[in-house]
Image (cartoon, helix red, strand yellow):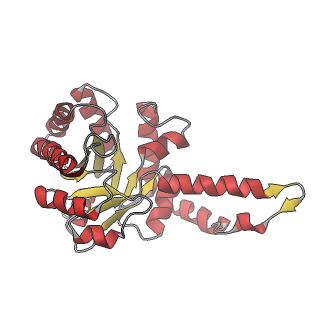
Amino acid sequence: MNNSPFNTFTKLHQAAAPLILPNAWDAASALICQNTGAQAVGTSSAAVAWSLGYADGGALPVEQHLNAIARIARVTSLPLSVDIEDGYSQNPEQVAELTCKMVALGVAGINIEDGNDTPESLDKKISAIRQALNGRPLFINTRTDVYLNALASGDKAINMCIERLELYKSAGADCGFVPGLSSTEEARSLAAGIDLPLNIMLLPGMAPISEFFAVGIKRFSTGPTFFQSVYGHLRESLKQLTPIRTDNNFFSNALDYGTLNSAFIKEA
């Protein structure tokens, strides 16, 4: 049990270095994360949904999400944390049932969010998850959308985050995720106000990870950025490919066939 994915993942939140968590969306992206030195892999709900032809925000059918996670779990030996949005239900028992199915696939953790719902609703979902797990380990990262939804700013936002995360912690949360937080000073105040590892999402123009880590932020997620970058590169490459022009730039940074194929042969 000491070397279980859950224990490994938990210790990464207590380490003397920041946990930089790349967010994958399919087996290939997860395996590339692993083979490039990631210590753990997360998923982005947006990226997973887009890759399967659905919009972000609860549109992805649960069974398709489970199938996608099963494919990722098959190829990676790293701790895997899955973004389940709000649990795809307002019924705490249904959210707990989905979470147990994720655990059965081998995931070490989940992200679950309050989104546009009340803090009390997420509190009930976390409690139901812990009850359904009946002692089975799972790292629960609870996301509060105070900043994303612009519910408050400055000290009011910090205090609102602390109040919500304290509630989620009492229900069984292991970590607090505050996407949209981009100020090191506000991060410092938030970290000082709650005894819980904190996670933020990397955003354009932010200070370096080292500065946020120095003020108490432990975990850094990429969100859908890598998916957006990959498909942005695809779009630009397609623009360069015309009947009268074959620009070699679209071969830049491409992984060779042998490297990719051999990685999956090992996982077959």
Residue sitting at 11 percent across and 56 percent down?
Answer: 193
Give percent across and percent down for residue 217.
24, 63
Give the farthest residue toward the front: 154
Examine the rendered structure and indicate whether residue 37 appears above or below residue 134. Answer: below
- Locate residue 71 relative to residue 166 in the image: left or right: right
Give percent across and percent down for residue 105.
35, 45
User: How many marks are shown on the rendered structure?
Assistant: 0
Q: Nearer the viewer, residue 166 or 149?
A: 149
- Locate residue 109 relative to residue 204 in the image: left or right: left
Q: Nearer the viewer, residue 161 or 91?
A: 161
Q: Quadrant of the N terminus?
A: bottom left
Residue sitting at 25 percent across and 43 percent down?
Answer: 152
For residue 22, say whether it is visible. Answer: yes
For residue 79, say whether it is visible. Answer: no
The image quarter containing residue 203 is bottom left
Give percent across and percent down for residue 163.
13, 44
Give percent across and percent down for residue 130.
16, 40
Q: Nearer the viewer, residue 130 or 197?
A: 197
Residue sitting at 74 percent across and 53 percent down?
Answer: 238
- Locate residue 165 relative to residue 177 in the image: left or right: left
Residue sitting at 21 percent across and 35 percent down?
Answer: 122
